[in-house]
Amino acid sequence: MNDHDFHNRQITQLSIKETPKGRYLSFEASFLKTFLDSYTRFHFCILERGTEDPVRFSAKRKHCEDESMDLLEGDFPLEPHLMNLKPGVFWDLYLVGIINDEEEYKYTRIKAGMEDIRLHSFPYQEHLFIPYRTKKGNVSFKLSPSAPISMIEDLKLTDDGMIKLNGYAVYIPEAQGNVEVVSKRLVITNNMNEEETFIPLQNEIRHDLTERYAAGGEDYSSSGFYGEFTPASLPIGSSNNYYKFYIEVSIPTSDGVQHIRSQRLKFQPRNATSRYQECTLKLKSSTYKLRLKPTKKSNFLTVRIYQYKPLRQLAGKAKRFVLRVKQGKTVKRAYKSSFILLGKLPAKKKQVVFESFLGKQYSCNPRAIYEYMLEHYPEYDMYWSIDPRSAGVFKGKGLKTINRFSIPWLFKMARSKYWVSNSRLPLWIPKPKHTTYLQTWHGTPLKRLAADMDQVLMPGTNTEKYKRNFLNESSRWDYLISPNRYSSEIFARAFGFEKDMIESGYPRNDFLHNANNAETMNSLKERLDLPLDKKVILYAPTWRDNEFYAKGKYKFNLKLELDKMQEELGDEYIVLLRMHYLIAENLDITPFAGFAYDVSHHTDISELYLISDLLITDYSSVFFDYANLGRPMIFYVYDIENYRDTLRGFYFDFEAQAPGPLVKTTEDVIRHIQHPDPASQANFDAFYQKFCYLEDGEASKRVVEKVFKTK
């Protein structure tokens, strides 16, 4: 590697070493000295994804040519640990830093850089042990069936549309030894049909691959390839055509020749200027644009061929330019200045703007307050602030809506006497002096909040910044709703809130008391197209702060084994799956049709509470609300040690005071559903008296009479 290629937390060398004691994973990684100096000591670890049992090994610090960096080297003995690695299981590489003498650990992923570390793979138990680079650029390991490890390194698009490419396709068999590759071909699929295009490839000698990667005597010198093709050889069906690429190698077998296909072909050019190429060409008497590039996260080669219409292209560019301008700092400053000026105008004293979960839902406490006011105080002019991407949620409900951050939104927010929200508003929006800001919040606290959090693991922020921004936001609140005395004490401290706390119970729970009847429940089930003759289990877990794809996009791995649930309970029950709104994934529950239903996008969870006979949750605050119904609850807490001790921490002894059994396996969930343990409900009465004693169906009335000064 070059002298200038040292980056923080990035692999600089990796190899598999064969020793008399077995194989070792040997590597070096570069780190900023300031980063390493922040720890008392450190070591590496391999952690099986989804578990909490790391395998630790030493990290030796050594000098780096770059004076701002240091190197850490480590040797991980693959035996006997390889025996525990099963196909489909992933190992992740971490540096573990010990921050102080109290053994406070911080786990940091190691980056892979751009070198194709997959070429260090080796056969193990009829599979390949593969080091690889994740979508986020981290180092991980897995066992997978043998397939060509392929890469395009050079690609040229000529003016007449000819695509010329070369790279390598290394085939490592599932058993020791070399296998002769008879031929290679490029396989191209499209987005229109199942037709595949095959392009023969020429062999190129690549001694460099053997020298760099073949530590066990393998010969990769015949793994290079070269090929070329034109768009005329591809199916052109629609006005917008996309193509994906694979390599197939052919190897001799006792029955003839076997074709083995690679995963989707990656494009990692030696010359960065060749990453994005395009040209204009004539196809079928029409003008087309041909564009090739790697995908953003995985570097897969993608080719797009689309009809070129100059006016439409110009309009698209203009639209994108306007969007960039809108999102720029200059426009934001102008918007803020306009907001301040409009905020100096007299307030519209009967005007209210409501918002729920950043404008994505018509739900929760803001909805309950709105509907109470609509019935009892219709003279108020009430608007809903909505995210335009969620506009469908608000259609057909007779609501007056305004798109967040639009010009009408600016006027309404700046002139309104009241704001009602259950989550934070952007700090760059100044609150006018005449505005009363009612913060309803959205849950009884179990997990530590804001200033009480020891460490913040959310993307796009850090602990200090998160707490600072939160306290700046809470300083703007004039009223804060609390469901009980317990919450009031925590909110005051965690939010730094010193103004008017309304200890009223949650308005959203009025519905659970006022609509708890068979007619309403059956009507809701019919609207959701649910069977009326089966009991309903609601599974509503929380999100994990440290499981995310990117800022604002969280992930969740469904740990509840639906196949076992369906087998044991399917005759009597159905399961509703309600994921937290921060989790961006869609669930694939197709195999469980008729038993499991994804209701993650049903905005009002109170309706789901009402139709459910049983709640399964974990650390989500939903159980505080569900307790109002007096129905059974089961707490599926498979990762409680990590969640309690590492991620958020709890305000009270959850394990001792939870109003239902705590279980860690699907089998135990099923057992408690089929054979409820009366002893496990012993905590319920004490829990209800502590957290639900204010809930009586009239919380909305108490809040409105307090805030809006109505007679």
Image: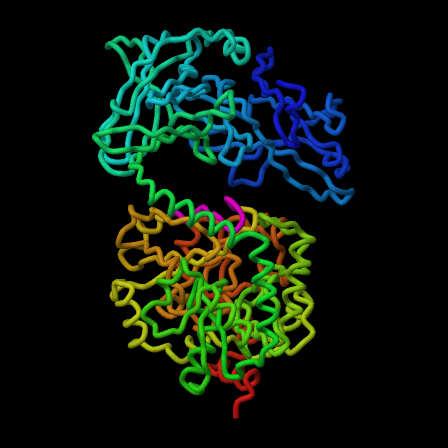
Is 559 a magenta residue? yes
Q: Is residue 101 above or below residue 570?
A: above
Judge from the rendering whether residue 294 lies leftward or rightward of residue 693; answer left or right: left
Q: Main secondary structure of the magenta part?
A: loop
Q: Is 137 displayed left or right of 228 in the figure? A: right
From the top left corner, tell me how far across and down residue 680 is, in percent: 49, 63
Residue drawn at the location 54% of the way across and 22% of the way down? 115
Q: Indicate left or right for 526 with 299 as reference.
A: left
- Residue shown at the point (31%, 64%) measured from the top left: 535
The residue located at (40%, 60%) in the rendering is: 390
Image: magenta residue range: 548-561
Coloring scheme of the render? rainbow
Q: Position of residue 87 (x, y in %)?
A: 43, 29
Q: Where residue 170 sits: x, y (%)?
A: 42, 15
Query: In screen coordinates, is 241 left or right of 349?
Result: left
Q: Is residue 323 above or below residue 509?
A: above
Q: Is residue 140 magenta?
A: no
Q: Is residue 682 visible?
A: no
Where does the image place residue 528, in percent across and percent down from the top left? 29, 64
Q: Nearer the viewer, residue 140 or 155?
A: 155
Which of the image's four quarters has the N terminus? top right
Nearest the viewer among 367 and 295 is: 295
> Of residues 226 and 148, which is closer to you in this image?
226
At x 21%, y 31%, the residue is 285
356 shown above or below 460 = below
Please state the total of marks drawn on the protein image.
Answer: 0
